[in-house]
Amino acid sequence: MRKILITIITFITTINMNAQEVDFNVWPKGELNTAYAQYFIGNSYLAPLDAQNGGPVNVTFEPRCRNNWHIHHKSVQVLICVAGHGWYVEEGKAPVAMRPGSVVAIPAEAKHWHGAAKDSWFQHLTYMTKVEEGSSTTWLEPVVDEEYDKLPASQQMLNTTDPEFTERFEAFAYDEVVNQVKAKLDDHTRHICYLATLLGCQGIDEYREILPKALDNGVTPVEVKEIVYQATAYLGLGRVRPFLTATNEVLGLRGIALPLPLQAQTTQENRREAGTQAQVDCFGEGMRDFWKSGPEDSRHINYWLADNCFGDYYTRKGLDLKYRELITFCFLAAQGGCEPQLKGHIAGNYHVGNDKDFLIAVISSNLPFIGYPRTLNALNCIREVEAVKK
């Protein structure tokens, strides 16, 4: 038992997970917790570890799942968070936010409950120690929604752990910066830019926090999915898939049925022609034969730009070309190192009607999420495109 716990605690120090994601290949999800379901709101799962020797149990909670108030008599329960975000709440004390590596020892006779944050899966290991003869557990009343909903979502936990930082950042990002750009960016467009920018800079935690706000500010589920889908052409599926998973989870929590209505307007047979037309619409007639240009050994990539990047994504419903060029600008500016492509898509934005002042407002709005170096690089790209125009 001691060796198991040492291994567990050593492993915890190496965990590096996104706030709301749980990789069940690391700590098993186990089986649905039917034996204790009457004492839980939502679904939980149990995965005993070394059950034959009384080892700890890994408990997985789906978002919003929590157990009832309860008391352990004549024993101490230990909780070790290994994934996701959750809460430990003891009667009469401040709630304790649990993140990977958090350890709580629950005193005997303490009335308490524990469970997941509103927007996060949560896994903790649990075992009993200092067990005396006659130990038992008394299950009490459930934690009702009115009580549970007073706790912040996982991303809002920063208000508890880092209040000074949060206050200063929010005053800058959501007051000073928003007031600077509001003449050029309405709330709907600003949140579309946020989502595309967070994809570009791989800000998965912030994306999860911003997405509900984007939906509240008029960004439709279809628009969100189109942003994520198109990002694949500029970031690759390896970087996009976590955002697609996060999007589906947030939409699911809002009761939005998936899959969404189909948006594709091309077929395998006509996607190249349609993609070429989208390139022409974005960059001008000079793109008409681009798909068959370039050295022979790499000409297929220019073909793929027409049939895949533009034919598969730009031709879809859900976003018009002005928004599609805008989100591409955000993808490229946020990931950095793409200045040649960024300058090309600045020209594309101009061609579809997104002018210099609008793009400067966009990068200004996005600055709190990508920092000054990438913002200044994007601004320099705009200046270089402007110089060529003159």
Image: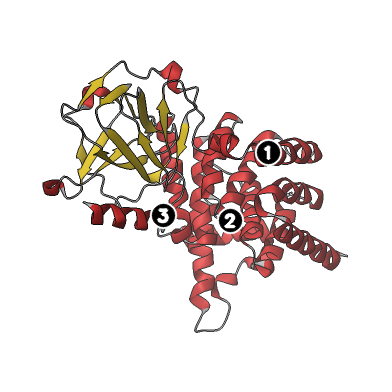
Q: Position of residue 115 (x, y in %)?
A: 36, 32
Q: Could you say which disc has been placed on residue 267 in the image?
A: 3
**Is residue 268 or residue 192 the one in the foreground?**
192
The reply to whether discs 2 and 1 touch (Cβ–Cβ < 8 Å) is: no
**Is residue 111 or residue 362 the one in the foreground?**
111
Q: Secondary structure at mark 3?
A: loop
- In the shown orientation, is residue 192 left or right of residue 80? right
Q: Which one is in front in this view, the residue at disc 3 or the one at disc 1? A: 1
Query: Which residue is labeled 2 in the image?
Result: 200
Amino acid tagged 3: Thr
Mark with earlier residue (2, 1) = 1
From what the image shows, is residue 3 above or below residue 121? Answer: below
Q: Residue at x 22, y 39 (%)?
A: 46
- In the shown orientation, is residue 108 left or right of residue 156? left
Query: Which residue is labeled 1 in the image?
Result: 164
Q: Secondary structure at mark 2?
A: helix
Q: Position of residue 201 (x, y in %)?
A: 59, 56
Amino acid tagged 2: Gly
How many other residues sit within 10 Å of disc 1, few (<14), some (14-19) or many (≥20)?
A: few
How many other residues sit within 10 Å of disc 3, few (<14), some (14-19) or many (≥20)?
A: few
Q: Residue at x 57, y 34 (%)?
A: 160
Q: Which one is in front in this view, the residue at disc 3 or the one at disc 2? A: 2
- In the shown orientation, is residue 20 left or right of residue 234? left
Amino acid tagged 1: Glu
